[in-house]
Amino acid sequence: MKFNFFRNGVFPGFLVCFAVLVLAGCGTKKNNQSGGSPATADKSKKIAVFIPGVMSGSPIYEMLAAGVNRAAAEQPDVSVTVIEGGFNQAEWETRITALAASGAYGLIVSSNPSLPAIAQSVSAKFPEQQFLLLDGEVTGNPAIYSLRYNQREQAFMAGHIAALVTLETETAEVRRVGLVAAQEYPAMNTIILPGYLAGARSVDPAFTVDFRVVGNWFDAGTGASLAADMIRGGAAVILCIAGGANEGVVQAAFEAGAKAVWFDTNGYGIRPGTVVGSSVLYQDKAAYEQTKRYLAGTLPFGRAEMVGVSDGFVDFVEDDPRYVSAVSPEIRAKQAELLGRIRSGELRLGE
Ligand code: RBF
């Protein structure tokens, strides 16, 4: 990463200063205003974005990089390096430790609920390294700021639309909605899955969830076969939270005449008519705003914050023409009524 210093001219600049100081016979540490190695000269403006996985197929990560890049582009001399950590989760800590050990970055940005534990561990060895973590929670570490989303709201809205659409299908007597997840993790098991079920049960308390796990974030073939099996078992609408495997779920739903609900971004365009709901979060906006705060020196390290529907970071997309043509006016009216109750604060889905 040191090559970046050559590219933007900071390192050569430092060399010139250093040479001048030495020639003038006053090259002492005291007179060296940069206070140490060139890596520390203005490293606060060097940001590493660590993608725990790959960006392709995972919009939550694409939004992360986009938001940080947008904030950086608005100021001179800020550089962003995006590093994809790949799907081997056992390697992530080693990769992040290497980033911290390089001393090259003022800030490491990342996102997902497994990052707090990893960042804590790296932070114990490199306490100077600062972290901005989204979609995760950690408090009390003076080097880490975290922001997560109210995913009970996000999942509740998905469960509500899934149940409403189920009631209009031929297998409506089977009060069961589907959820295909890539893997089990605490936020999935204690917030997203229960929130999804609660949303379906707010339509009819008889609803249950058929919950299946792919085992990774990329296998569309397994996603498709799980979804096909669930549809044979009577689930007519399936929420997919499985990264690259989502494509398989939607394809299987399309082939069987079933429906899918999309999570994190607007997914109506994936397969118009088959995708009947999009419960979204605006991670690009969050990454942009928090990076701006960092660059302004106002990011409150040590704190954890949560944002939801009323803050404008979680939403359900209902103004897309492909949503309008995919579901009946009656369903849209009921979904709109729910959204109104969440937005106004009448229905509180705290955590
Ligand atoms: N979400 C993705 O979209 N793609 C991923 O590759 C991905 N990897 C994850 C790895 C771990 C260990 C955990 C805990 C979560 C991961 N997520 C991933 C899920 C993400 O944090 C979030 O829960 C979902 O995107 C739903 O908002």
Image (cartoon, grey):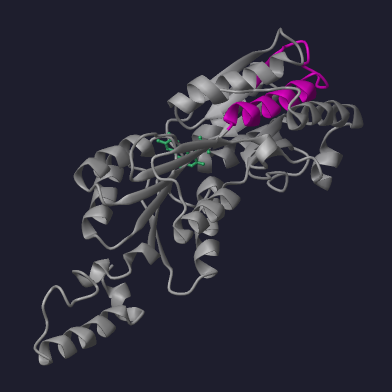
Tell me residue 205's x, y (percent). 72, 8
Q: Is residue 262 left or right of residue 192?
A: right
Q: Is residue 41 visible?
A: yes
- The magenta stretch spans residue 262: no
Residue at 69%, 36% in the rendered image: 310
Tell me residue 9's x, y (percent). 33, 82
Q: Is residue 251 visible?
A: no
Which is more toward the observer, 210 or 160? Answer: 160
Please determine whether, in this image, residue 339 is positioned above or below residue 80: above
Q: Which of the 4 image quadrants contains residue 302?
A: top left
What count of labels does the image hold?
0
Please determine whether, in this image, residue 99 is positioned above or below residue 175: below
Residue at 50%, 49% in the rendered image: 61
Q: Is residue 126 left or right of residue 252?
A: left
- The magenta stretch spans residue 162: yes
Q: Which residues are magenta?
A: 150-177
